[in-house]
């Protein structure tokens, strides 16, 4: 058995791997057993957050905050954590994460059915910002406000005591957890990051279709391993 430590903004994570084929197949255990608030207290507190209301009022969309919270803290909670960027306009309207074409592509990448993806006992979806940040004057998505992660991320991470594998979807998540700047280089080094319980992925947006065509190894090499690890994680007692 091998033990690895990763130090980052969320503190020390200890990961235990039993080895095996590929990058070391075996269910990951991040060894994190922190204190946390009761589930509904933390979830309801985030849903009631209006910290970014003045910021959103100045965007082209001039919308109100609507935090999209999709995780169950504590014992018996999910083993798989998906860290995205921020909700888009469709998710802002639906109140459920990844209810858009990006979500369809992400579910295809992971091999998760829609029922599995939204099963709170199996999967947590915690973006770098809980609210839709709005559009700029050109109609492009604004970046997730950093204040959201600074305010909530530590407490949410402490509450997810059962998480063993974290999918880092997009550059914002990679920068926060890995300090990584180049998405292609980080995703290409996915095997190295598994020792700390992280699996970096590009954002599944249609804007990255060209990236997928330029990097065929993503579908031929990375995705089969990703699906196998997720299936093993969810099916191991």
Image: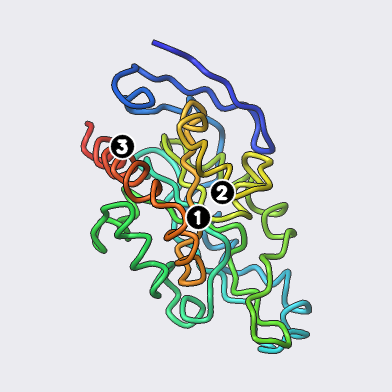
Sequence order check: which comes first, mark 2 or mark 3? 2
Residue under label 1:
202
Give the CA distance from mark 2 to mark 3. 21 Å
Q: Which x, y percent locates residue 183?
A: 59, 50
Instruction: Look at discs 1 and 2 and give the one toward the viewer.
Output: 2
The C terminus: image quadrant: top left
Q: Determine which of the numbered discs, if any, sits on residue 184 in the image.
A: 2
Q: Secondary structure at mark 2?
A: helix
Q: Determine which of the numbered discs, if any, sits on residue 115 in the image.
A: none
Note whether 193 is above or below 180 in the view shown.
Answer: above
The N terminus: image quadrant: top left
Note whether 230 is above or below 126 in the view shown.
Answer: above
- Asked where in the image residue 70 lies, by quadrant, the reply is bottom left
Q: Which x, y percent locates residue 173?
A: 59, 51
Label 1: few (<14), some (14–19) or many (≥20) C-alpha neighbours in 10 Å: many
Label 3: few (<14), some (14–19) or many (≥20) C-alpha neighbours in 10 Å: some
Q: Secondary structure at mark 1?
A: loop
Sequence order check: which comes first, mark 1 or mark 2? 2
Q: Return the residue nearer the eye: 57 or 101.
A: 101
Note whether 119 is above or below 67 in the view shown.
Answer: above
- Asked where in the image residue 60 lies, by quadrant, the reply is bottom right
Task: Identify the residue at image location x=65%, y=31%.
Answer: 11
Q: Which x, y percent locates residue 229?
A: 31, 37
Residue situated furthest front in the rendering = 214
Instruction: Look at discs 1 and 3 and give the one toward the viewer.
Output: 1
Q: Taking 232 as reference, is 69 left or right?
A: right
Give the CA distance from mark 1 to mark 3. 18 Å
Q: Secondary structure at mark 3?
A: helix
Give the CA distance from mark 1 to mark 2. 8 Å
Q: Return the residue nearer the eye: 128 or 78.
A: 128
Note whether 188 is above or below 69 in the view shown.
Answer: above
């Amino acid at each position: 058995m091998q033990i690895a430590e990763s130090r980052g903004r969320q503190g020390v994570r200890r990961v235990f791997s039993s080895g095996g084929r590929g990058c070391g197949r075996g269910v990951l255990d991040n060894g994190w057993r922190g204190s946390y608030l009761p589930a509904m207290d933390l979830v309801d507190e985030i849903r009631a957050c209006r910290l970014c209301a003045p910021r959103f009022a100045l965007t082209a969309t001039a919308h109100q905050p609507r935090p999209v919270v999709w995780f169950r803290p504590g014992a018996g909670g999910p083993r798989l954590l998906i860290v995205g960027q921020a909700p888009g306009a469709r998710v802002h309207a639906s109140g459920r994460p990844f209810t858009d074409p990006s979500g369809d592509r992400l579910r295809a990448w992971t091999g998760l059915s829609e029922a599995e993806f939204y099963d709170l006992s199996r999967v947590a979806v915690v973006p770098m910002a809980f609210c839709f940040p709005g559009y700029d004057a050109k109609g492009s998505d604004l970046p997730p406000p950093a204040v959201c992660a600074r305010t909530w991320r530590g407490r949410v991470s402490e509450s997810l005591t059962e998480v063993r594998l974290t999918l880092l979807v997009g550059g914002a998540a990679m920068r926060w957890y890995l300090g990584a700047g180049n998405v292609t280089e980080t995703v290409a080094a996915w095997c190295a990051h598994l020792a700390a319980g992280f699996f970096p992925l590009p954002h599944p947006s249609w804007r990255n279709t060209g990236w997928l065509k330029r990097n065929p190894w993503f579908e031929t090499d990375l995705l089969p391993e990703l699906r196998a690890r997720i299936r093993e994680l969810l099916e191991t007692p």
